Structures are given as structure tokens and as C-alpha cells.
Amino acid sequence: MTKQTQHTPGPWEVATDGATVLAGQFDEFVADCQSDGYNAESAYDQDRANARLIAAAPELLEACRNSLNALWAKGANHTGEQYPNEEDVTRYLSPQDKKLFVELKQAIAKAKGE
């Protein structure tokens, strides 16, 4: 769970055009969400929504990691083991927490390209 991704470090921000995502103090290009949609008004709104979601990605990934670590600690506290494995940890989680644990792991893996 400690392997870091290789993405451009955050924070990421939406540029003044509303559809470009930039990072860092030097405005490093991250993504262009400008589409070639047929319906200009709905494409405009969708482009901006996509840019906002992409700009939030580093913070969302960090929140997922922190939440996964919190669930791990919650389960690990019950194992009595110094270095418990995932099966031991999840055994002590509620069904809802187990589901969340799996969803968080999958989201993090997707973000890391695994």
C-alpha cells in the first residue's frame, strides 16, 4: 500500500478557459477536456465538469489512500498481530467496511494503472 504513483504532483487546477487542467506553480499541462461535441452548450458544460473532476484527482487519490489506511488500522487493531495480512484485517471489518475496503483498493489500483 505504500507504492506511489508516477502522476504529476498536485495540486491541480482548472485553467481560466475552464477546460484545461494545470499543475504546480509553473502551470504544467495535465489535461485538455475540450471536446468536439455537436451540442455546443451541453459539450461546454460537460467539458468543464470533466476538467473539475480531473483537477480533483490528486486529492481524491490521497483521500482514498487515507481511508484505506484507516480501515486497515481499524481491522489490524483486532488481530493482535504486528504485521497482519489483508485476510486477517478484513475478517474484523463490518460487511460495509469490507465492501468499502475492496472499492478503495480497486480505485487506487485503477489510478496507479494496475
Image: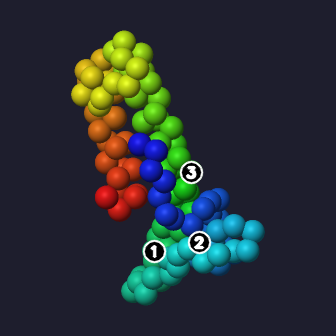
Can you say whether 74 is above or below 7 in the image? above
User: Which residue was labeled with disc 2?
Assistant: 21
Residue plotted at (60% across, 77% down) = 29
Residue plotted at (53% across, 75% down) = 31
- Quarter containing the C terminus: bottom left
User: Which residue was labeled with disc 1?
Assistant: 42
- Looking at marks 1 and 2 on the same chain, the residue that comes earlier in the sequence is marked by 2
Residue plotted at (45% across, 50% down) = 3
Q: Tell me the quarter of the picture where residue 112 sits.
A: bottom left
Locate residue 94, reporting x and y percent. Answer: 30, 20
Q: Tell me the quarter of the picture where residue 73 sits.
A: top left
- Looking at marks 2 and 3 on the same chain, the residue that comes earlier in the sequence is marked by 2
Q: Secondary structure at mark 2?
A: strand
Dot 3 crowding, Cα within 10 Å, few <14, some 14–19, many 20+: few
Q: Secondary structure at mark 1?
A: helix
Residue plotted at (52% across, 43% down) = 63
- Quarter containing the N terminus: top left
> Mark 2 and mark 3: span between their CA atoms?
14 Å
User: Which residue was labeled with disc 3?
Assistant: 59
> Mark 1 and mark 2: span between their CA atoms?
19 Å
Specify whether 29 is left or right of 109: right
